[in-house]
Amino acid sequence: MIVDVHAHYHPSAFNQALGRLTQGRVAGGFPGQPDTDEEGHLQQRLEMMEQAGVGMQVLSPAAGRAPYGADEAAAIAAARAGNDATAELVRRYPAKFRAFVSLPLPHIDASLRELRRGLDELDMVGVNLHCSALDRSVAEAEFEPIYEELNRRSSVVFFHPCGNGILSPLITNYGLGAAVGTSLEDAAIVLHLIARKLPAKYPNITFIVPHLGGPIPMLLDRLDRQFSMQQRELPEPPSVTARRFYYDTVGHGSAAGLLCACTAFGASHMLPGSDFPVLLAYETYTRTFAYVREVALPDGAASQILERTAPTILKLG
């Protein structure tokens, strides 16, 4: 069974609460794409899953749609609205959907309460963290209570870019936020986690990074040479830590990118993702997964990536 770990869902109650949190700066969803809880959208989604051979989607909000904001009450309301509405879809289709908990960052105590509610009461399979919250990397020290709780629970964290062009005018001024900036966010969160030694400090957490890890698979040897293990007092070479993470297959059909990532990380540390419904603007949902079987990967690698890794790490049976 293909378990799509990277699928977005924006129910109407969440969109409304998010609009209040952001004072209308964030649009409610993807016009023309099936990302909401409208019945027609849900049926389109289910039909696409059937056609693509996807047995289950794990749901979370897309770039720019995390319930993060300075107004604590509004952030809590948005996170709860999104989690409740997503949990309702999971209850309606328990064999088809699971979800990651969204947190009202940067408000740590409120986030811990919502984390516990999402995992204990709503039966979610892990936590979604966007790569930064109010322009602070979520690897910073103030967010460590989140990792402490995830580590205590031996839980999963799924990262996602914010779509902020990595806060660089060298990206944003050239309109490269979606084309390049998101992949650089993916790489940055991997490097921030390594630099702050969080995987060693919290070894029971399963870390999932999207989009093949951005440029990380091409940089492992360079990191070992120029991101000094001794100078930074790292417990192991950066490449070893990077290989402890898991990476999804969202790569816009790039055979070279998938082969590079599989060579760098191994098939057992890769799992299927789609960025649903984002890639529907460029390819069919079926195509998003079919390309994995067409790349010249080692024997058995495609089946490992598409069918075995995700159910194992998400403990889906």
Image: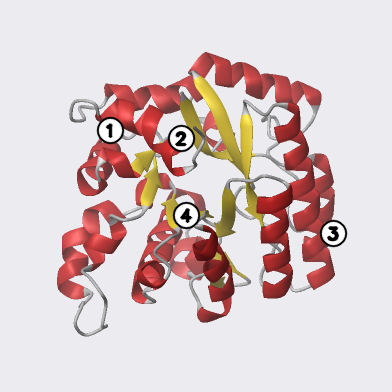
Whether residue 180 is situated above or below residue 131 in the rendered picture: above
**Residue 18's quadrant in the figure?**
bottom right
- The mark that comes first in sequence, 4 or 3, is 3
Label 1: few (<14), some (14–19) or many (≥20) C-alpha neighbours in 10 Å: some
Residue at image mark 1: 255
Left/right placement of residue 97 relative to residue 144 reads right
Closer-to-camera residue (287/157)? 157
Q: CA distance from mark 4 to mark 3?
A: 25 Å
Q: CA distance from mark 1 to mark 2?
A: 24 Å
Residue 311, which numbered label? 2
In the image as oriented, which residue stretches furthest toward the bottom? 231
Q: Are marks 4 and 1 in contact (CB under 8 Å)?
A: no
- The mark that comes first in sequence, 4 or 2, is 4
Closer-to-camera residue (302/176)? 302
Query: Label 1 amino acid?
Result: Ala
Query: Label 3 amino acid?
Result: Arg
Left/right placement of residue 214 relative to residue 130 reads left
Q: CA distance from mark 4 to mark 1?
A: 19 Å
Residue at image mark 3: 20
Q: Residue at point 81% right, 50% down?
A: 81
- The mark that comes first in sequence, 3 or 2, is 3
Tell me where residue 135 appears, x and y as whole percent. 58, 72
Q: How many marks?
A: 4
Dot 3 falls on a residue whose secondary structure is helix
Dot 4 falls on a residue whose secondary structure is helix
Q: Residue at point 41% right, 59% down?
A: 184
Query: Label 2 amino acid?
Result: Pro
Q: Are marks 1 and 2 in contact (CB under 8 Å)?
A: no
- The mark that comes first in sequence, 1 or 2, is 1
Whether residue 14 is situated above or below residue 151 in the rendered picture: above
Residue 302, which numbered label? none
Whether residue 173 is situated above or below residue 278 in the rendered picture: below
